[in-house]
Amino acid sequence: MNYIFHILVILEIYILLALSANQKVGLSGLLSLGQAVFYGVGAYASAIAITKFGFSYWLALPFAISVCIITALVFSLIAGKVRDLYFSLATLALQIIFFSIFYNWISVTNGSYGISGIANPEIFGIKINSPLSFALFGGVIVSLVIGFYVWFLKTPISRLIQATRDDQVAVLSLGINPNYYKRISIIISAIISGVAGSLYASYTTYIDPSSFTLDESILILSIVLIGGAGRIIGPISGAFIYVLLPEVLKFMQMPESMAANLRMILFGLLLVMIVRFKPKGIFGKFLIQ
Amino acid sequence: MEIVILIVLNSVVSGLLLSLVAIGFSYIFNITGVFHLSHAGVYVSGAYACWWMFMKTNNWFIAISFAFAVVVILIYFIEKIVYSPLNKQKSNQSISLIASMGLYVVIINILALLFGNENKLIENSISGSFQFGNFILTKIQLIQAIIAVLATATFLIYLKLSKSNLTLQAIADNETISKVFGINTEIERIKIFIIGSVLASIAAILAMLEVGIDPYSGMSITLTATVVTILVSRMNVLLIILFSIALTILQSIIEWFLNAQWKEGITFFILLLVILFKTEGIVSYNLRKDRT
């Protein structure tokens, strides 16, 4: 039973990551190859706050969000200056730079050894340390984020963000600065990724740079594109496909060593086929052009 | 001083290998517009095919020929099944980048499934070294340098003799008009992909001789090749070679004074600076800057 709850926690983390990527890709039309940067920044900021500063999870979480917001501001100032493929390249560069920092800034991140002993959260004295309690805790966070999006997608800011995606020149002609709305989008995305990172760090109680690589960024982006960008259901269904695919393979008596590679092969093929035959993704609204 | 010369000497050899990958990447990107990240997958496929066939036959000629055949078939199907239809749909560079990422994931995981994740090395394939005064160059390094120079020279001669420069320029500028003037753009595109991929596979085989190969080893060199491509920004073979060597020297210096793991971070920091601040000089600024 614990295994099912473990899968549920992983699914919740990927739903958060996919929703955060959808904010950039689906709502703003910004194809980012650096989504794992904020996931990593959130995880490391939480882990450092808990293990080095002695913060509780509830203090570490706003600390991690603050660090993500500052990073996103710098990120948006840099990447916001370029567009299309060059935006993707700028985010790719940031991904590699941040991975180098995670890996090499040993005095802070402990390099390849990572940070262990990250405390679990507590609510009213009850420690959240079992897969079941984490699944419930993660479920609450995911529900809050989905609730936020149900509200946010109806707001004028969200519509302006989508207008910037669809026709930047038209937005500009109305005297509105599109970069401002891109920046808001990048910051919202970073906050959600940071929360996912914080949840991941406190769940696994150990993090190292290998969880925040370019491959992870590609994976998060793929989840959104397969599920479909621009709507809430798209990234959620993408995360379901990614997390539940290996379980299906296990039912087919596939050895675990093969299942991991086979999952990625199927996922990669699905990505190519989606791009080729259904560019909006399974449930998507926005077509990347 | 001797150390500096040694670093430069080793970097020149590594830079020549990088330049083969970068020439291939740049050739594909600048003409077809495809940001071909699965170049990394094609790179490792060539090396794996060579390693596998050498293990079966112990014959370099058969192994290398087999590697080229595998790479040509692989890239032919990639172009025919994925890139060409996307091009016909008038998909933009972001779409081809996404497709390319998907292909990369598929290729490396198939290789990992077939051969495992561990490094494959042909033990004692070529041993020995040469001494030039106080400096030692291994036989493998010398072979790498000679073959890389020969491959680049062959590519340059091909460009010159085939007089394809203008044709390629026409395709890069406007593929539809090129078709109107009778250029078979589909055939030209396939040729471009094949030549670019064969150049990458030569670099992969040469690198495999020295350090072996694993499914993930293609991404690092391909990412560095993308940096060279963006820095140079046009299909100029000599500039690509110069930038490749300069970048490799810089990486060696970083490796020597800091840590090997910083080299990619600093390389991409340079890319970021160039994307953001480099004006008209090497790159057309209009393509990149969001003026709105």
Image: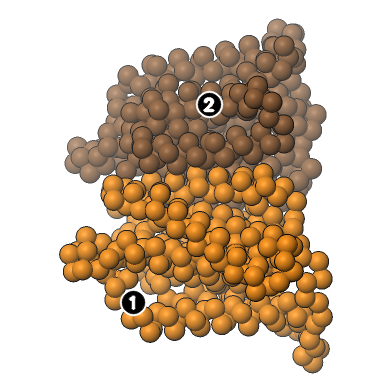
Chain colours: A brown, B orange
Do circles 1 and 2 both sit on a common chain?
Answer: no
Picture quadrant of residue B164: bottom left
Q: Give me the residue at 56% from left, 29% from top.
A: A242
Say what amino acid the circle numbered 1 marks.
Ser
Report which residue position mark 2 lands on: A241
Q: In the shown orientation, is residue B166 left or right of residue B22?
A: left
Please report contact status of discs 1 and 2: CB closer than 8 Å, yes or no: no
Q: Give me the residue at 22% from left, 44% from top.
A: A169
Q: Give me the residue at 72% from left, 36% from top.
A: A257
Say what amino acid the circle numbered 2 marks.
Ile
**The one of B254 and A231 positioned closer to us in this rendering:** A231
Q: Position of residue A99 (x, y in %)?
A: 63, 47
Near mark 1 (Cα within 10 A), the count class, few <14, some 14-19 or many ≥20, is few
In the image, is residue B151 above or below residue B29?
Answer: below
Report which residue position mark 1 lands on: B164
Question: For the N terminus of chain B, which image quadrant?
Answer: bottom right
**The one of A216 and A162 positioned closer to us in this rendering:** A216
Residue at disc 1, secondary structure:
loop
